[in-house]
Image: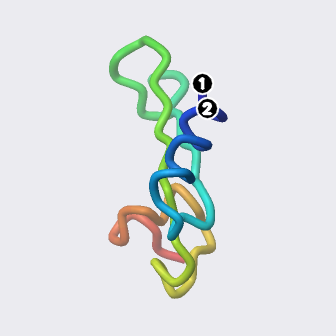
Amino acid sequence: MIHSEKDRLLKLDKTITGFNIGMNCGEDAGQTIFHCHVHLIPRRKGDDKAPRGGVRKVIEAKGSY
């Protein structure tokens, strides 16, 4: 499912150059609804000046390194 959605998004938007994939598995990891839930986050070159940290850094205030 992730691969097919990734391929679909790449066909729709040629500016996408990468992806982050995020999942919260278990209450201690932040999962609040216990079903399969996957975040496929399209990324673009330059969308973050320092993309180190991946998914944790998608929300700027959440990634302090």
In this view, the residue in front, 57 or 41, is 41
Front residue (pair 65, 35): 35
Tag shown at residue 4: 2
Residue drawn at point x = 47 percent, y = 74 percent: 64
Which class describes the residues within 10 Å of circle 1: few (<14), some (14-19), or many (20+)? few
Q: Secondary structure beneath disc 1?
A: loop
**Image marks 1 and 2: residues in contact by CB distance under 8 Å:** yes
User: In the picture, which quadrant includes the N terminus?
Assistant: top right
Q: Mark 1 or mark 2, which is nearer to you?
A: 2
Question: Is 21 drawn above or below residue 10 in the view shown?
Answer: above
Instruction: Tell me the amino acid under the disc marked 2.
Output: Ser
Where residue 31 appears, as percent x and y from the top left, is 42, 26
- Image quadrant assignment for residue 27: top left
Would residue 46 be found to the left or right of residue 2 on screen?
left
User: What type is the residue that disc 1 sits on?
Assistant: Met
Q: Position of residue 20 (x, y in %)?
A: 58, 53
Mark 2 Cα shell of 10 Å, populated few (<14), some (14-19), many (≥20):
few
Residue visible at 53% across and 65% down in the picture? 14
- Measured Cα–Cα span from mark 1 to mark 2: 5 Å
Q: Is residue 63 left or right of residue 45?
A: left
- Residue occupying the point 61% across, 32% down: 4
Q: Relative to 54, is 26 above or below?
A: above
Q: Residue at x 46, y 60 (%)?
A: 13
Q: Position of residue 36 (x, y in %)?
A: 49, 17
Q: Which residue is mark 1?
A: 1
